Amino acid sequence: MYHIAVCDDNQEEAHLIGRMTQEIMAQREIEAQVDLFFDPESLLDKLQQTQIQYDLFLLDILMEERNGIQLAQAFRQRGYRGKLIYITASRDYAIDGYKVKADDYLLKPVEKDTLDQAIGRVLPRLETVLLETTGDMKILQLQQILYVESTGHYVLIRLGDKGEPLCLRATLLQVQQKLGAEKFVRCHKGYLVNLAQVQEVRVSTSQILLHGGDAIPLGRQYRYEVQKAVVQYVEQAISSY
């Protein structure tokens, strides 16, 4: 599933853009969740409080409290890598929009066909992985995975929906190779963590805090590599926009 955030302090326009986006995704036969936000702070709060990683942000620029440029800078600095399309009534911020490396810039009133074309250009294909669990084959999006925990001869894959974990007969190393070592790093002898889900590395308490509030252990011997991996991940996220 794609996760899309629409932020516009004009609620009527936010609902219109959200409805068009939902229709576009349905016509493309792509499952999507479209969340509406009517001020920048509510979007930032959502990013802080949940494990959702938005694939696409549709932002107005002229908003109170923070404008859309400042909002993008804030969540890029926190490592959020979703694509970004500005939808605004003003041409005055076009240059600033490209300075924060927005993927597209649309002027209101935006037509559905125009929005459809823009979404088609920028929305990335979700990275998926095929896993053989105990008795089933599962296709997962990498962003669904919070962390992986070893237990005996099995590993448990903890998912963002807080449901039952997936159980695989495998080693952590085998799972890390399957998921990608550049995205899933060893943080403890019994854990892998999805870098996209890391909110804070707490060396003082030997914990990693994830988006949404989960905390997993951080082993002493893994501290340096985890910190290095998190820094590289965030720097890559910022530089790619």
Image (cartoon, rainbow, N blue to C red):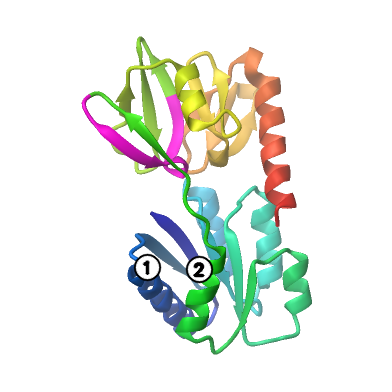
Q: Residue at x 54, y 31 (%)?
A: 180
Can you see residue 7? no
What is the quadrant of residue 33 in the picture?
bottom left
* Cα gap from disc 2 to disc 1, whole angstroms: 9 Å
Magenta-colored segment: predominant secondary structure: strand
Q: Residue at x 27, y 33 (%)?
A: 137
Residue at the disc numbered 2: 120
Magenta residues? 135-148
Q: Secondary structure at mark 1?
A: loop
Task: Please name whichever residue, 231 or 137, is drawn nearer the observer in this view of the structure.
Answer: 137
Does the magenta portion include 120?
no
- Picture coordinates of residue 184, whole percent (x, y): 54, 30
What is the quadrant of residue 165 in the picture?
top left
- What amino acid is found at the position of numbered circle 2 in the picture? Gly
Q: Is the residue under label 1 in contact with that under label 2 (CB below 8 Å)? A: yes
Q: Secondary structure at mark 2?
A: helix
Residue at the disc numbered 1: 28
- Most extreme residue toward the left is 135
Q: Earlier in the sequence, mark 2 or mark 1?
A: 1
Can you see residue 100? yes
Q: Quadrant of the N terminus?
A: bottom left
Q: Residue at x 38, y 71 (%)?
A: 22
